[in-house]
Amino acid sequence: MHLLKPLGVEDEDPAPLTTAMQLVMDNIRKANRPALHTLSAEKAKIQYAGAADILEVPSPLMETEDNYQVSALDGYRIFIKVWRPRKVRVLSNHKLESLSPALVYFHGGGFTIGSVQTHAVLCKEIAACSQMMVISVEYRLAPEFVFPTAHNDAWSASEWIFKNAADLKICPNHIFVGGDSAGGTLSLYCAQQAVLNGYKFKGQILFYPGCSATQDMHSLHAYASGYLLELKSIEYFYGLYHNGNNKSTQYDWRFSALQSSHLKLMPPTWIGLAQCDPLRDEALELTRQLQAQGKQVTCKVYKGVVHGFIKMGRFIPEARESIVDCCNFLTQLISQ
């Protein structure tokens, strides 16, 4: 088995958790909820939704929240929500309307759990901090919908946003893309697919994205259990989305960015990682590959925290720090 050496983190894994992170993990254990991979998909969705905002900061107030429906490839109507913060950047004007930058965001959840609602606070945090509109996409989930349904839905929504930018009061040259975990996987795909279809995202933000077809990297074994996201959960989610761990679809470049021959098409990318996360080294390897392609990429590893930490801002300082960091990256790109 080939274990890739981590980049930019200590060799002494597993690393200790921060005091705040350890306290959160202790409280999660005391709650004694069953591990998601031991539940049916339906019960996993319910359990995750019920606890999604417990550790988050108070929800920022928005100027407007608008809902739209977008046609998927098969005619299904994809729900998207558009948040406009109270203070928003204005970059240009079109037909007397002010146009602003926007981020297309895909929520995490292993392609099985999560929703626009479970990630609403996070999206509104980014909107308020970056002073840009944020658009969250309700792509379809496993096990009812397997690969590549979520990917196709993500791209259908992205393409619709590009085509209707002006009507949405969005500056078409300042559309960004991003996501966390499985949402990061979808963002990576859409960032490449956009260029293949004649569009271009201004930039990309990724929180601990899944980007490998195989689970054989150093961090996966160092943090296989006891750190919130576990190897068994990864296998559970991938099995549901890939119709029983179908290796041929897991190696598809749309799912595994590390298998892609299109990385040269990536926009400037910011990657925020948890040190104590089994997926950490996948994104570190992606960083290496983007650097080898000469692409602009910034990768930061937040020490002593676990996968999912960005939704724990009420207790984990690194969550708030990561929001500021990614928004600073977005702001810098806007000014370029």
Image (cartoon, rainbow, N blue to C red):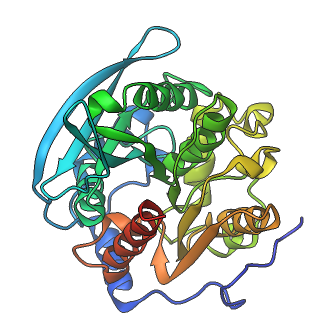
Q: Is residue 8 left or right of residue 134?
A: right
Q: Residue at x 35, y 47 (%)?
A: 102
**Residue 59 occupies quadrant:** bottom left
Which quarter of the image is occupied by the N terminus?
A: bottom right
**Residue 326 occupies quadrant:** bottom left
Q: Is residue 200 above or below residue 229?
A: above
Is residue 106 something that shows in the picture? no
Q: Is residue 62 above or below residue 313?
A: above
Q: Nearer the viewer, residue 297 or 71?
A: 297
Q: Is residue 256 left or right of residue 84?
A: right
Q: Residue at x 71, y 47 (%)?
A: 265
**Residue 250 occupies quadrant:** top right
Q: Is residue 5 above or below residue 90?
A: below
Query: In the image, residue 150 lies at what x, y percent?
Result: 52, 30
Q: Nearer the viewer, residue 275 or 223?
A: 275
Q: Which residue is most to the top?
A: 75
Is residue 114 something that shows in the picture? yes
Query: In the image, residue 148 lies at what x, y percent?
Result: 62, 27
Query: In the image, residue 212 lies at what x, y percent?
Result: 72, 52
Q: Nearer the viewer, residue 169 or 215?
A: 169
- In this figure, what is the number of numbered marks? 0
